Structures are given as structure tokens and as C-alpha cells.
Amino acid sequence: MENNSPAHRAALSTEDYHKLTGFDGDWRDTWWDDEFLSMMARQWGLNRVETVLDVGCGVGHWGQRLLRHMNRTTTLHGVDPEKAWVEGARKRAQKLGQEERSDFQIGTAENLPWPDNSLDMVTCQTLLIHVADIHRTIQEMTRVLKPGGLFLAAEPNNFGSTAAGFISNPMPPWEKIFDLLELEYRCTQGKAAVGEGHQSGGQLVMDGLRSCGWNDVKVKLNNQSARVTPPYTDLASKTMVEFLRTSHESGAAMVVGSTRENCLRYYLAGGGEKSRFPMLWDQARKRLTEMISAIDEGTYASAGGHIHYLTWGYKPAF
Ligand SMILES: C[S@@+](CC[C@H](N)C(=O)[O-])C[C@H]1O[C@@H](n2cnc3c(N)ncnc32)[C@H](O)[C@@H]1O
């Protein structure tokens, strides 16, 4: 692991951080099904794409999944600032038999190591929620795209997804939901205020493209809801339960900042009142404990409600 670790993971062990990002294991793969992606591939015209860049590629989940729906001649480029992730992406490419068609390198979304107008497609997943300035990043991604090339972002609205998850058994009373939403909202605003990204940035991508001069922008939602159902043996439920258990055991909570220390930092930056924080944090931890108890009893069930936008368009001739 590089020592330029972002602040938000500082209090977590490397192992827990890997689990919570979903880079280890199958969780990220459960976000998509290939039937849906193959339908979308036709709408997007992926058969016309010979060069695609996955920005903030992590260990490669998104770009490598899309590559399954592209021509055999298509090359997948990936860029990420973290050496460990770039190496992970190369290893996964080898495992997936995509090595010959892949090129992963270190770099940042704000300064992409590609010339202007050079790629058929530029894409990202859960990257724009981490950048300091979504507009600037979209502009840079646009720069390297050929005129007529496809921009595609798969980015969530985590605030909305969290709220949707409260309407599940065990269902908290309104006073508690009020507190939990307050904590989530303040942390979301605070994270953006300290320049670590807007956790619900998926909601902002369409507007970001429009303000960069893209008039014809399309938006759809992912078709996976992130449901969790007993006995938690199907892949989606199993991986979500693992995620909840890791959050619980690592002392984190299902709010933007994960650890207490980090949540407090975001909460204060988001205009939160310091004296309310211990009570709000306690509520968030209790909610997680209740969910874990219900899972242990086999009674926790949620239809999910993951809000994950697909936002796309074709680069206009500016
Ligand atoms: C949540 S992960 C998503 C990884 C991958 N796109 C996926 O869906 O599996 C966010 C990734 O963005 C990378 N990242 C964060 N800030 C970045 C930046 N300014 N430029 C490029 N990548 C960045 C992180 O290193 C991390 O790998």
C-alpha cells in the first residue's frame, strides 16, 4: 500500500479497507448483470469502440466487465493514482484472459496521460464521487475523447441509497431516521467541503456534462437493487452481509466517513454541531448492531434501493 493513503481510510486496517472498497472478492461484480449490460451495450454502440479508458480503474472491475461486451479487438486502458490498484488490475486482467487487450497505468483523472481527441470511449465507476471537482474532471475526460466518442459514468447517489435502506426490517422510528439522515447529510456535505468528493455525485454528472456544453445527455439507473435476503447464500446477499459485518467489526458505521474519527471530521466540516455528534454516532452504530443481530437471527431482509446512475453522451463538436 502506498503511504499517500487518503485521509478517509486512515483509521482502518489495510485488510478492512480492501474489504470495504469491495476490491477483494465479488461484491462489485454483483452490481451488474450481463444481460442488462448487453442490452445497454447495444444502446451505447459499444461495437464501435476500439479504445476505451477506465478512469480511477481501481483493480479493474468496471472496465473489465464492460470489455466482455466489446469487440475482441478493443483495447482497455485504465488509470489510477494508486500503484497497488494498478498492479491488482494487471493481475485481474491476467486471470480474466484480457492481458493482451489491457494497459493499466498510474495517473490521475485531473491530468490524464493521453493526447487530446484520442479515445473512442472514456468511462468511470465510483470515481467522480471521490474527486475534488467533478466539473474539472469531466472536462479532462472530455479532452481525451474523440469528437463523437462515448462518455459513460456509473456513479451512485449514496445519500438516497442509504435513505432507501431505512425502509427495511428492523425499521427505525422516525426520530432515529431523522438522526441518521442528519449524520449522513452533514458528512456528505463535509466530505465535499474538504475536497474529498461528493458521495452522492452520481446525481451531479448530468448537470456537469451539460455545463461543459453537452446538450444531449442520457441517464438510466442500474437494474440491480442490492437486495439482501435470508439465508444470505446468493452472491448479492452474501457479499452485502460480509460488507456489513466488516463495517461492524472494524468499528465503522454505514455513513460516509466510515470510522468515528473520520465521520467527526466530515460532520464538523458539513456544519454539524459538535455536541450532537456522540449521540448521532451512537445511533449509527446501534443501527448497524441491530442489523447484524437480525442477520444472525435470519430475519433481516431488504429489497435494497441502490441508486446508481448510468449517465452518458457523445462528445459534441465544440
Ligand atoms: C471506489 S474506487 C472505484 C474503482 C473502480 N472504478 C471500480 O468501480 O471498481 C475509486 C477509485 O478511484 C481512484 N481515485 C481516487 N481519486 C482519483 C483521482 N483524482 N484520479 C484518478 N483516480 C482516482 C481510487 O484510487 C480508487 O481506485
Image (cartoon, grey):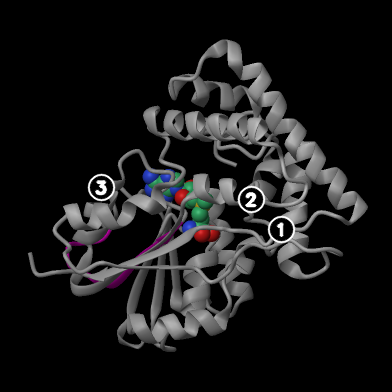
Up-down: is 102 above or below 289?
Answer: below
* Amino acid on which the number 2 mark rests in the picture: Gly
At 19% from the left edge and 59% from the top edge, which residue is drawn?
Answer: 143
- Mark 2 Cβ and ligand 1 under 8 Å apart: no
Left or right, 134 with reference to 315? right
Along the viewing direction, whichever of 184 and 42 lies nearer the viewer: 184
At 41% from the left edge and 39% from the top edge, which residue is drawn?
Answer: 197
Q: Secondary structure at mark 3?
A: helix
Question: CA–CA distance between discs 2 and 1?
Answer: 7 Å
Q: Which mark is residue 302?
A: 1
- Tell me residue 238's x, y (percent): 78, 62
Picture quarter containing residue 260?
Answer: top right
- Tell me residue 74's x, y (percent): 39, 82
Residue extent of the magenta highlight: 114-125
At 19% from the left edge and 71% from the top edge, which residue is drawn?
Answer: 146
Crowding around mark 3 (Cα neighbors within 10 Å: few <14, some 14 to 19, many 20+) is some
- Tell me residue 289's x, y (percent): 80, 37
Query: Residue beneath label 2, please?
Result: 165
Picture quarter containing residue 257?
Answer: top right
At 51% from the left edge and 30% from the top edge, which residue is drawn?
Answer: 187
Q: Which mark is residue 135?
A: 3
Up-down: is 119 above or below 133?
Answer: below
Up-down: is 185 above or below 23?
Answer: above
* Amino acid on which the number 3 mark rests in the picture: His
Residue 66 in view of the camera: yes
Picture quarter containing residue 279?
Answer: top right
Answer whether residue 124 is magenta in the image. Answer: yes
Q: Are marks 2 and 3 in contact (CB under 8 Å)?
A: no
Along the viewing direction, whichever of 52 and 43 lies nearer the viewer: 43
Q: Earlier in the sequence, mark 2 or mark 3?
A: 3
